[in-house]
Amino acid sequence: MTDHGQNLDRRRFLKLTSRGVLAAGAVPLLGSILAACGDDTAATTTTRAATTTTAGATATTAAAPTTTTAAPTTSTTTFEEMRQAALEAETGDLEVHAFAGTEAPEIWDYGYGDAYGTPVFTPIAGSFASLAKLQADPGGIDIWQACFAVFATAVDEGIVQPWDTSLIPNYVDLNPQLVDATQRNGEQFAIPLLYGLALVTYRTDLTVPAPNSYGALFDEAYAGKVSWPDAWGAEAYIVAGKLAENNVVDPLNPTDEEIERLHSYLIEKIRVIPRTLYADIPTNQTDLASGSIWVTYAAPTQWIELQKQGVDVSVVGAPIEGLIGFSCGYFLLADSDQYYHAHEWVNQAVSKGAAEATTNTRNFGNSNLTATDVDPLLANVFGLGDPSVLDGVTLLDKIGPSDVLNERWAEVKASA
């Protein structure tokens, strides 16, 4: 069955009936739903004229008469009425676990608050930290915002369920590259909101020569002048794996043997290269501005903010290994009891207005191709509105053994 905005498939129908939200007048719709899926279709026949052509002349003869079954009475209950009934039937608060700042109304509230009230927002410390919490106890959470390096684990372990995109009208405006990266077997397991690039950011006045590779992060010429993210995790193995010297065939899915080699490489480098492992963006910006570090690995937000401050800082925009990128957005928890409210909320959270507010306040690209009314610097840096902007970018959404690599990263840090 095709699952469009004017059709309810079996999964949606069962959710409606299980919650007792179908009014008596809606019950007759069951027959048409099943019929649309190829079940219980009433046999009908029609009278059709047979046409023959002879020597350029057309003669029409009547076919044998047949009987026609009377059309069944159809319900006047519409999809929208059923959706509204489902929304009204869901009681309790919508619970959203998301990055700090998501609770700001300009990020999500384009009519939802007036209609359904303000959700309960709980800030998360980070994508992998929140994943660990959900693995232990996902109870009570409806929507989870995270970056999609956790995608495979969340889907494989059944922590999340697919979204019904027919209930998200703004879905049609989202970047198809980001949409495709967050699908599994044709189902949309996450709704992308923002994206960024993982860049080598450096002090142009202090580094000679300027780095042209992710290898600058591991270059002993900058020992003691480099900062790595403390929560680098699996990503550290992807970055190191892209370097030609490490000879990894598919950095997003390293083999066991390649992981061991990368592990040894990172242990060797962490003992020599980084001055700090930074835990937050403001600290990283301060260290770059002061010159206590010269080279770091960061999203463009640091570079953008330091440019505004007049600091002589630049980025490797075209590393020889190819760019690494990431995206983040919203998951629907498998045991959510706010299914329809969650869809209503996320539709507004990826709307044009919300996406523009996200870009302007967080210095990230956004997934909505219509959301381009932002700071021109940001629009240019992120190629907003361009559906091919991420062509050739290695998206961290597709990391394979993320759990294994995160555990190994903890061992790397402990070895320093």
Image (spheres, grey):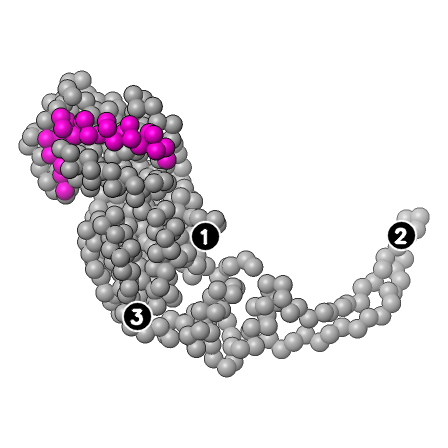
Residue depicted at x 36% and y 32%: 255
Q: Is residue 412 visible?
A: yes
The alpha-carbon separation of the residues under discs 3 and 2 comes to: 65 Å
Q: Quadrant of residue 406?
A: top left
- Dot placed on the residue nearer the N-terminal end, 3 or 1: 3
- The residues colored magenta run 253-279
Q: Residues within 10 Å of mark 2 (few under 14, many from 20)?
A: few
Q: Which mark is residue 187?
A: 1
Quarter-wise, where is residue 259 in the image? top left
Q: Alpha-carbon distance for marks 2 and 1?
A: 50 Å
Q: Is residue 121 above or below residue 29?
A: above
* Disc 3 secondary structure class: helix
Q: Earlier in the sequence, mark 3 or mark 2?
A: 2
Residue drawn at the location 30% of the way across and 41% of the way down: 404
State the image coordinates of residue 72 (x, y, percent, origin top left): 65, 76
Q: Is residue 322 above or below residue 388?
A: above
Please, what is the three-letter code of the amino acid marked with disc 3? Tyr
